[in-house]
Amino acid sequence: MMRLATWVAFAIAIACGPLKPADASDGPGHLSLDGVARAFDDAALRVNNAPATELARWTDPIYLALADDAGMAPIAPAAEAAVRALAAIAGVPVTRVAWRDRRVNFRIQPGQGDRAGKSPCRSTVDWTESGRMVRAEIYVNLANAERITRCINHETMHGFGFRSHAHAALSVLSYTHAGQAELTAVDTILIETLYDRRLKPGMPAETAAPLACSIIAEKIGATAAAATLCPGRGATAKRGLAAFGGPRSLADSPPTLPALQPGYRGDGL
Ligand SMILES: [Zn+2]
């Protein structure tokens, strides 16, 4: 069975001030295991606002197509570069193909947005029950020029298997850090971890969470903290699964307010 999930990345139409410190702060020596592991759980082991049943990532090559609509030409190189940058970390081959190529499984195209973000950047992805990503569709709000870099990087992260957001971390997937346009050190660790060969596509979230935590601990030199912080992570995910398990078909609409995660900024709603 194929599952369809849809995200809406709100283009928050306010000036972005200095970034607030986060518990998964960016920068050498300042990454906390708790913060980065939480970012992984939030972004990779959730589907929008519900716990994910399983880990999902690309196992097949990506065949990338970019729409040739008016307005896409100036951003096409950056969009392709964003996909290739993540793919290089993930170890996924990328081939650029024509829009109507039958192999295409990753497309980037204009959305229907406006400057106020009323119809903002968004993406949809499909994956199988065995956790194999099979398609990503990214819609870029070309009208909101100053946020296109963030839009591309944010949605491309979704397109690689991060089906939710890492609001508490200094990540391009955070709405708390809504001014973060480029990938951060946390984002690099997130994608390295998702595509680490010790994690498997389709792995149950309750198995993946503690394992991902231990992988992150290795990466940031926090193996001593792992013994305390990692083992319990799966239990929380499993409790959530009891309520949310099973195939989900999610509407293409903003998350409802009661389901928002801590740190969410609803300015763009
Ligand atoms: Zn998003």
Image (spheres, rainbow, N blue to C red):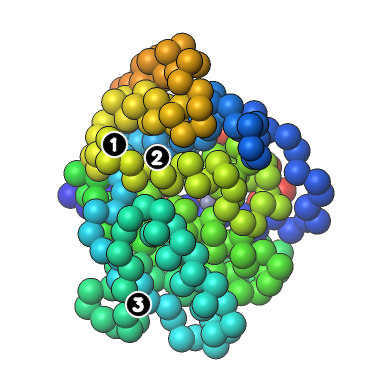
Residue drawn 80% across and 46% down? 18
Dot 2: few (<14), some (14–19), or many (≥20) neighbours within 10 Å?
many
Circle 2: element type: helix
SS of the residue at dot 1?
loop
Q: Which residue is mark 1?
A: 199
36 above or below 87?
above
Q: Position of residue 106 (x, y in %)?
A: 35, 67
Q: Are marks 2 and 1 in contact (CB under 8 Å)?
A: yes
139 or 225, nearer to the observer: 225
Between 167 and 32, the one nearer to me in the picture:
32
Total marks in image? 3
Residue at 68%, 45% (x, y): give it. Answer: 177
Residue 162: give x, y in percent of width and height: 42, 46
Three-letter amino acid code at the position of disc 3 = Arg
Residue neighbourhood size for the residue with mark 1, other residues' Cα within 10 Å, grouped as few (<14), some (14–19), many (≥20): some
Q: Is residue 143 left or right of residue 87?
A: right
Label located before the other in sequence (2 or 3): 3
Q: Residues within 10 Å of mark 3 (few under 14, many from 20)?
A: some
Q: Would residue 229 be visible to someone looking at this image?
A: no
Question: On the image, numbered disc 3 is attached to which residue?
Answer: 96
Q: Which mark is residue 47?
A: none
Q: Is residue 187 left or right of residue 212?
A: right
Q: Position of residue 17 (x, y in %)?
A: 81, 49
How far separated are the C-alphas under marks 2 and 1? 8 Å
- Nearest the viewer among 196 and 162 is 196
Query: Which disc number belongs to residue 193?
Result: 2
**111, 160: nearer the viewer:** 160
